[in-house]
């Protein structure tokens, strides 16, 4: 493992925590710009389990979240995978603490998010 690879792996959990902070800020304030700063210019968000998106690029992501905003903040339950290029974590909605709602799957390029797939568990997707 190179020094660069080791540094990127150790930064992945920090990037996850930062994304959650920025997402939760967006839910509370309707200001999604801080969250978008971690995405590459052509970054993409894809939803699996709900009929929304996909959204590519900062303008489309911001518009999508503005037009169909999430109604709750999230917390990470478990980091499932962490490599320099990929990060996967399970999450819960904060109105149902500890109840797994799905997974956040990040494709990374350094410290930038190239693609975020939000996979909602089927049982939860039906009530969201």
Image: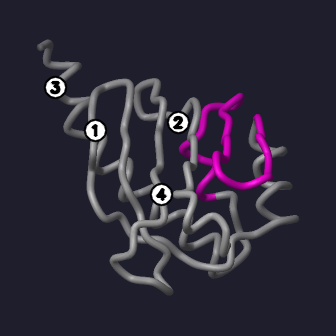
Q: Read off the residue under disc 2.
A: 113
Foreground label between 2 and 4: 4
Q: Secondary structure at mark 3?
A: helix
> Which quadrant holds residue 110?
top left
Given this view, does label 3 or label 4 mark the residue nearer the observer? 4
Q: What residue lies at 76% left-to-right and 69% top-to-bottom?
A: 69
Query: Which comes before the other along the chain, label 3 or label 1?
Result: 3
Q: Secondary structure at mark 2?
A: strand
- Does 97 sit above or below residue 106? below
Asked if the stretch drawn in magenta spans residue 46, the answer is yes
Residue of label 4: 102
Residue 101's tag is: none
Write down the region rendered in magenta.
34-56
Label 3, label 2: how many angstroms apart (C-alpha)? 18 Å
Q: Which residue is mark 3?
A: 6
Residue at image position (31%, 65%) is 77
Circle 3/circle 2 CB separation < 8 Å: no
Q: Of 112 and 27, which appears nearest the observer?
A: 27
Determine which residue is flagged by label 1.
Answer: 81
Spatial CA distance of label 3 from label 1 is 15 Å
State yes or no: discs 2 and 4 in contact (Cβ < 8 Å). no
Pointers 3 and 1 in contact (CB under 8 A)? no
Q: Residue shown at 54%/76% (left/top)? A: 73
């Amino acid at each position: 493992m190179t020094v660069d690879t080791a540094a990127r792996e150790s930064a992945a959990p920090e990037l996850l925590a930062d994304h959650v902070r920025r997402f939760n800020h967006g839910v509370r304030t309707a200001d999604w710009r801080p969250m978008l700063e971690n995405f590459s210019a052509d970054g993409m968000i894809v939803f699996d389990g709900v009929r929304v998106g996909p959204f590519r690029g900062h303008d489309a992501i911001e518009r999508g979240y503005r037009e169909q905003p999430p109604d709750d903040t999230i917390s990470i339950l478990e980091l499932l995978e962490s490599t320099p290029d990929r990060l996967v974590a399970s999450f819960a909605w904060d109105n149902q603490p500890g109840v797994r709602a799905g997974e956040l799957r990040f494709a990374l390029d350094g410290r930038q998010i190239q693609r975020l797939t939000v996979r909602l568990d089927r049982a939860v997707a039906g009530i969201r």
